[in-house]
Image (spheres, rainbow, N blue to C red):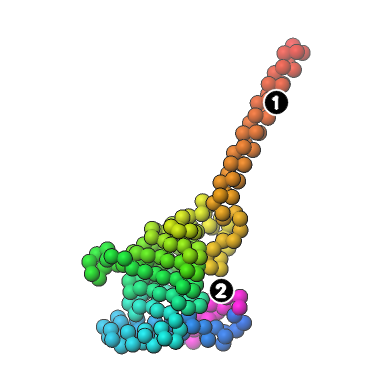
């Protein structure tokens, strides 16, 4: 248990440049919110729903983070800052990072009253501040959700989604991104869709120019051979 706690604190510290020590990480509201959720989820699975709700309520008052006791959360989950809401049927994998003011919200049940209503975040997902991920959708492994994006459809593995409604960056995130992008939002101009389209057109023009040059060079060679023939 102690090793698991230390490993978790180290995983949080690695994702937050402001963290100077494990002791400092222990004071983070996201760490306390997750600890409270572990207890609330244990009670919830034991059908002690009222006690689970009490734990959830107390944690929400002290951390400004609302995680429904029924939500399923994997290892090394980190909420950086507060005002995040995670719904009952949300499923979160390992090594997921969520920033402030994020909502994993529910829509109409897919399979009746107790059906899946909230998102699933696979391993390594990063969700930027203010993002809204709504409905029983799946964000694939290492998906990045940019700040303030609104996501209502499945996100492919390794994709970066930005905007309202969220749209994928044309070039796969794994081609540019490091293992961790703060706030899930790429800041390089390479990730701007308009800039990327311009770069694609420039590449196409360059290729056409090379073909024209080759053609002209070939014609010039033919003329020289005819003149000396």
Q: Position of residue 59 (x, y in %)?
A: 41, 85
Judge whether 14 appears above or below 141 on screen.
Answer: below
Image quadrant assignment for residue 21: bottom right
Prevailing secondary structure of the magenta residues? helix
Residue occupying the point 45% across, 59% down: 164
Judge whether 81 appears above or below 120 on screen.
Answer: below
Looking at the image, residue 110 sits to the left or right of residue 173; the answer is: left
Residue occupying the point 70% across, 26% down: 217
Image quadrant assignment for residue 102: bottom left
Residue 158 visible in the displayed image = no
Image quadrant assignment for residue 43: bottom left
Judge whether 160 appears above or below 217 on screen.
Answer: below
Q: Residues within 10 Å of mark 1 (few under 14, many from 20)?
A: few
Q: Is residue 82 in the magenta section?
A: no
Q: Position of residue 158 (x, y in %)?
A: 49, 59
Question: Magenta span covers which residues?
Answer: 2-18
Image quadrant where one finds the C terminus: top right
Residue 162 visible in the displayed image = yes
Looking at the image, residue 137 sits to the left or right of residue 128; the answer is: left
**Residue at the spot of label 2:** 15
**Residue at the spot of label 1:** 217
Residue occupying the point 63% across, 31% down: 211
Camera-side residue of 31 and 146: 146
The total of numbered circles placed on residues is 2
Q: Residues within 10 Å of mark 2 (few under 14, many from 20)?
A: some
Looking at the image, residue 15 sits to the left or right of residue 90; the answer is: right
């Amino acid at each position: 248990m102690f090793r698991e706690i230390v490993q978790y604190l180290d995983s949080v510290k690695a994702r937050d440049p402001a963290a100077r020590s494990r002791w400092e990480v222990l004071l983070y509201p996201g760490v306390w919110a997750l600890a409270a959720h572990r207890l609330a989820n244990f009670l919830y699975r034991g059908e002690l729903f009222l006690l689970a709700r009490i734990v959830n309520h107390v944690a929400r008052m002290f951390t400004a983070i609302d995680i429904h006791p029924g939500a399923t959360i994997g290892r090394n989950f980190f909420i950086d800052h507060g005002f995040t809401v995670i719904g009952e049927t949300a499923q979160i994998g390992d090594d997921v990072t969520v920033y402030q003011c994020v909502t994993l919200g529910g829509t109409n049940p897919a399979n009746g009253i107790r059906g899946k209503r909230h998102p699933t975040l696979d391993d390594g997902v990063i969700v930027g501040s203010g993002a809204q991920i709504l409905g029983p959708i799946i964000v694939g492994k290492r998906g990045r959700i940019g700040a303030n994006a609104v996501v209502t459809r499945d996100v492919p593995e390794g994709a970066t989604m930005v905007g309202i409604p969220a749209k994928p960056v044309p070039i796969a995130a794994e081609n540019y991104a490091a293992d961790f992008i703060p706030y899930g939002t790429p800041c390089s101009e390479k990730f701007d869709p308009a800039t990327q389209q311009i770069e694609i057109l420039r590449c196409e023009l360059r290729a056409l120019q090379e073909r024209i040059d080759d053609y002209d060079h070939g014609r010039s060679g033919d003329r020289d051979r005819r003149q000396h023939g």
